[in-house]
Each structure stands twice: as structure tokens, then as C-alpha cells.
Image (cartoon, rainbow, N blue to C red):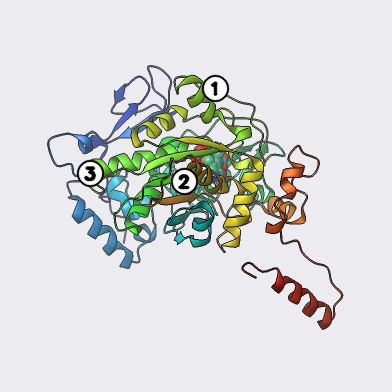
Amino acid sequence: MPPSAIPEPGVRPSDFRFHCLDCGHVADSASPDYRCPRCGDLLEISYPEWNKSGIRSRASGISADDLKSRWKERRLSSTPVDLSGVWRFRELLPALNAAHVVTLREGNTPLYEMPQCARIAGVPRLYAKHQGMNPTGSFKDTGMTVAASFAHHAGYRWIACASTGNTSASMAAYAARGGMRSLVLVPEGKISWSKLSQALDYGAVTCQLRTDFDGCLRLFRIEGQKTLAIELMEQMDWQPPDHIIVPGGNLGNSSAIGKALLEMRDLGLISRLPKLSVIQTEGANALVRTLREAGGKRLISVNAETRATAIRIGNPASWKKAVRVLEATGGTCEQVSEVEMAQAKAEIGAEGVGCEPASAVTFAGLKKLVKQGFVKAGETVVLILTGNLLKDPDFTMEFHRGDLFAGTPDESEGTALSRLRHPPIVLDATLDAVLRTLEQADKSAPGC
Ligand code: F0G
């Protein structure tokens, strides 16, 4: 059967606008770079019908309860758009003919309970929404399916991005799936081999250089990435947690999650907003400084340096949106040291979950927010783990071998983490040697 010419349910172009959050300019259409024609800032897609006060807002003319049951029913379907954990929520996305949808069955990621980490942090209920379980191993896929689909719809032959690694891996995969070519610009020597190797395998033209520009389809990526929050609320039976904690780099993800939370509230899908907080490392703390030293009014860029290469960004593109989202939800921004991040990563790993270094800042940040009293006893917290453990094996190996902080100012603090290290043990190939090692390990096991 030829693909249907009727758009799938979604928001028709007549019902969404391109909105500049900075100068307030609103337009029906956007130029190919999706920047504001008046002030040059990044545009965002907005749905004016959803936040009209006085009337009950509806998405695509459907009530909140009907949306919830429609999304649930789709889980039994076997069509590609329904199997995608992004397009399943298409009533909250710009409409697109299904023939253009480029999907790798992204989304549908697990929400894990984290009892051990909850005890360590001192909170009763802690969950991790693991976006590293996406097809290319990071949260970028939920955004990329929407960006690549709209690029396909627009007839693009090439798509391009600058990236610290995960965006490029994801973009290369979705370009390949959609029959498009891809150009990837990555900072030389500062991204993990796993991420670079993904881009190569998916056929991208890959240039290693120093840059901080991002793909022009960012605005569609944000729309896709916001579905992580919709899926999370569905997994929590539409009972929002008290806190959601995300790592912050370019700050697209925090903006996307915040956008989804506000839209869901406007549509009556949730009745209250969780506080959304952003965590950075001390070495790449542009948002922390922007809020603390400039009251969120102007960006304070930094010369970023951190082993969490995914968030080694000194000049975050979406900082204004992130500031707005923190204000709107009552969240905060905190920074953690390299040692705190490494410890948190090992603790998440010890729970059988694991993540890449950038994701672990969420747990390190949570511990601080509990100590400061920002996260209160009895509150429910969700950490967004953005990338898979396998994304940065060098970091993990160096940590367990004890080399991660060697020769750095953190060396002595780093040695305090030795109880969390599990270096590989070289043995004679005898049963006796293996048994002796096992006995020793058993004595040192947690709880003994
Ligand atoms: N966590 C991981 C694993 C990331 O790859 C990124 C960003 C972030 C967190 C931060 O998210 O930028 O939306 O605030 N990675 C981008 C990239 C910059 O190019 O892959 P953000």
C-alpha cells in the first residue's frame, strides 16, 4: 500500500508557532537556520492553544484522559511509529506523514528503582530513567528521530552537527536509516573512542576539530527529547516525582524536559510540576556561574575542562531556556567535582545499572542537594541517566585501575575511592589461585 497522504495525528502547522523566547517574536514559519529574524536567538516550537487560560486545553482536540489511554493502547501495536517511544506520543509533536518517520524504535527506556543509591543519598525513593538504553546508547536518539524525520520530509540530502560525541553518533545512525548523508564535527582528542567509532560505522563524514556550533535542526530535536518526560510520567502513573535531576552541557535536554513538563501541566496531563535541577562539573560550570554571578541575566562562558567529555561545553547554546525552566519549576543548579562524579558513577555501576561519566553528575549532585536541604526527607527523586556505561570505557578502566586521577590535583582525594575500585586481577591459571581470590573477595564483599 502506498504511504498515506493524510498526516498522522499530531499538531498541524496551523496550530503551532515558531517562538523566540528571548524577544518574544512569534512567526508562522521559520528560516532554514531556525533563528529569530529579529534578534537571532534560537527559536522554539510553541503550541498556543495549549495554555489558554479559562478553557480546558486539549492537544489535537483530545482530552488528557483520552490521550493517556490512546498512548497506552499503542503499546500493543506493532507499527513502527507506535513501537517508537517518541512517536507513540505524536499528539504532542508537530504532525508528520508516517512515510517520513525515521525511527530505530527509540525511547521505551527503563525506569529503574535505585535502593542502594537511595540509601547512600538519604532519600526514601530514588529512580533512574536510563536514556542510555536508547538504540545508539544515549538520550540523543529521542530527539534525533524527530530531527531526522523532518529533515527527510524537507528533502535534505545531508544533515550535520557539531558534537561532544553522542549527538554525532545518533545523527549518523538516523541519517543512515533515513537514506541521508551526515557530516560530523567533533573536538579533536576530546571525545571517547566509542562515540567516534559509532559515527564512523554509520557512515558519517567525520571531521575532528574545535567548534561549538550545533545542528540547525535543534528545535525539532528538542520536541523529540521532550517525550522522555512524557514517557517518565506515564511510567509513574502520571504522579510526578518531587525532583528531576539532569546533567547540563549545551542545556538542550533540560530545556526539552522543562518544556514537556509545562506543556503537560497546561494540558492537564499532570497536576503539579516537579522541580527540575541541572548539575554540571566544576570544570564546565557555565550555567552555575551564570546563575550565581549574573543572576541568570547574561551568560558567563568558561574554558571547559572535565573528564565528562560529553558535557565539556563552556558556551551552552540553550542557557536562556534552561534559566527559564529552572525558574518555572523551582529547580536549582549545582556543580560537583571530578572525584564526586567518579564516585557517583561507581555507585551507580555497583547497583547493576551503570552510566557514562556525564550522567553520574546527577547522583553526585543529588547528594549535595540533600545535604543542603533542597531535596527534603520523604521526597521522590528521578535521575536522568543520559548515556550508556559502554560510551566511555577509558574512564571506567582508568578508574578501576586507579589511574584516573594520577598526576592531577585530585590524586589524594581520588585514592579515598579505592573501596569502590574493582581492578582486573592477573592470576596463574590454577583452580587454587581462583579459589583463593574468590575467598578474599567474599570477605571484602559489601555487608561482610
Ligand atoms: N549527558 C550526555 C551523555 C551528553 O552526551 C550530553 C550532551 C549531556 C549529558 C548534556 O546534555 O547538552 O542537552 O545539556 N551531549 C551533546 C553532544 C553536547 O554533542 O553529544 P545537554
What residue sits right under mark 1 in the picture? 300
Residue matched to label 2: 144
Please give left or right for residue 430 compared with residue 275 in the image: right
Name the residue type under label 1. Answer: Ile
Q: Amino acid at mark 3?
A: Leu
| Residue at 29%, 41% in the rendered image | 263
Q: Which quarter of the rendering shows the N terminus?
A: bottom left
Dot 1 crowding, Cα within 10 Å, few <14, some 14–19, many 20+: many
Pinpoint residue 169: horizontal percent, then vertical percent: 58, 48
Q: Position of residue 320 (x, y in %)?
A: 43, 27
- Answer whether labels 2 and 3 touch (C-beta < 8 Å): no
Query: Cβ–Cβ below 8 Å for labels 2 and 1?
Result: no
Q: Please, what secondary structure does the residue beneath circle 3 have?
A: loop
Q: Residue furthest bottom?
A: 431
Instruction: Confirm if mark 3 falls within 8 A of ligand 1.
Output: no
Q: In front of the other: label 2 or label 3?
A: 3
Q: Residue 301 occupies which quadrant of the picture?
A: top right
Frontmost residue, 191 versus 445: 445
Does residue 202 appear anywhere in the picture?
Answer: no
> Disc 3 designates what residue?
267
Which badge, 2 or 1, is on the more N-terminal residue? 2
Q: Nearer the viewer, mark 3 or mark 1?
A: 1
- The residue lying furthest to the left in this view is 54
- Decide: marks 3, 1 in contact (CB < 8 A)? no
- Residue ID at (70%, 73%): 442
Who comes first in sequence, dot 2 or dot 3?
Answer: 2
Which residue ends up furthest to the right in the rendered image?
A: 428
